[in-house]
Amino acid sequence: MMTIADVRAAAVRLEGVAHRTPVLRSHTLDERVGSQVFLKCESFQRMGAFKFRGAYNCIAQLTPEERARGVVAYSSGNHAQGVALAAQLLGTHATIVMPHDAPASKVAATRGYGAEVVEYERGRARREEIAQKISDELGATLIAPFDDERIIAGAGTVALELLEETGELDAIVVPVGGGGLLSGTATAAHGIDERIAIYGVEPENGDDVRQSLERGEVVSIDVPQTIADGLRTQAPSELTFRIARANSVRIVTVSDNELREAMRLLFERLKIVVEPSGAAGVAALLSRKLVLPRQRVGVVISGGNVDALRFSYLISPQAT
């Protein structure tokens, strides 16, 4: 199983390439939840989300011959943009398989980084099969969104930076889609201090990781219906499930309305724009689904890729 050494190696590759994102505090948030909260704001990362870290760490390790043949990925948005930008920076071509209902801003950004986008209809086709077929035809390398130790190690650099800045923490809370960020966070944090509690937050309608950990095996669910498009995964991979289970990760779930409330508070009090998926950790604390009294808590804001009209609607009273 991967270790913190893999995360530290990823940090070296990312040095001077990825942004060292800020850690913000809010007195209002601390009072509301009864904890000292440290927000690691990956919404300020290149391409607007933590996904750039794993994508770059992965593609940077390909051979020149592999890069010459290009890369393929599948994603609803942030992994797509991360792979597209990393490919551009590392001189390779990216083909990205994206659902037909992916946010228009994320599709436009992916194309803007020079990637070719292949759309599919969610629920009627399997994105993994489409991407694998393209990979086979082109001889390109498939860059999975979370089922890859290089992706996980890159994501783990978020927690590494957080702990370097804050010092000791009692807990770290992260959004959970396929479990790459969760696994990387657990690997990095427990490589430094095994006492840190690791919490993952999923949408109520997309609790595949929670069910998997409860049953002791990977569980697959239907496509979740939630405003958190980045968390609409149907199952963790065997790799992320194994890492999460080995690190005694705990999962809580939040509703769409709780995500909206968290987005609203982050905008009003900290003046930052956060996408629904990125607000999951704050939503868990605000809703009291996760209560950590008088503890020092790190929360990863995983991304801020949401277009202006959708953001303004989601935080408005008529959206609830």
Image (tube, rainbow, N blue to C red):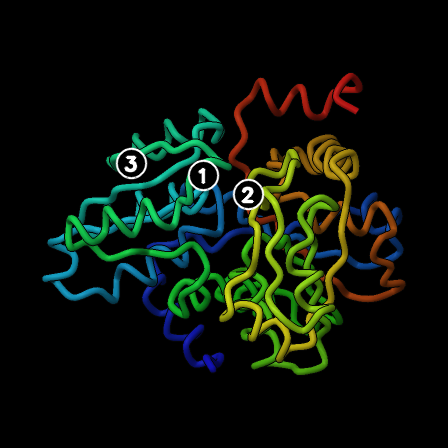
Judge from the rendering whether residue 72 lies leftward or rightward of residue 305; answer left or right: left
Q: Which one is earlier in the sequence, the residue at label 2 or at label 3?
A: 3
Q: Is residue 11 visible?
A: no
Tell me the quarter of the picture where residue 298 sits: bottom right
| Extreme residue in the front direction | 124
Q: Are marks 2 and 1 in contact (CB under 8 Å)?
A: yes
Q: Secondary structure at mark 2?
A: helix
Query: Type of residue at label 2?
Result: Gly
Query: Type of residue at label 3?
Result: Tyr
Mark 1–mark 3 distance (CA, rounded to whole Å):
13 Å
The percent position of residue 188, horizontal first and vertical second, equals 54, 74
Judge from the rendering whether residue 207 lies leftward or rightward of residue 165; answer left or right: right
Q: Give the residue at mark 2.
A: 230
Q: Which numbered disc, 2 or 3, marks the residue closer to the eye?
A: 2
Q: Is residue 45 visible?
A: yes
Residue at x 25%, y 35% (from the top left corner): 116
The percent position of residue 179, horizontal first and vertical second, equals 56, 60
Query: Type of residue at label 1?
Result: Gly
Task: Please name whichever residue, 2 or 28, is drawn nearer the observer in this view of the structure.
Answer: 2
Q: Give the residue at mark 1.
A: 77
Task: Please name whichever residue, 71 or 300, is drawn nearer the observer in this view of the structure.
Answer: 71
Q: Secondary structure at mark 3?
A: loop
Mark 2–mark 3 distance (CA, rounded to whole Å):
19 Å
Q: Residue 162 — which label?
A: none
Q: Which one is earlier in the sequence, the residue at label 2 or at label 1?
A: 1
The percent position of residue 103, horizontal first and vertical second, equals 49, 28
* Whether residue 127 is situated above or below residue 196 in the rendered picture: above
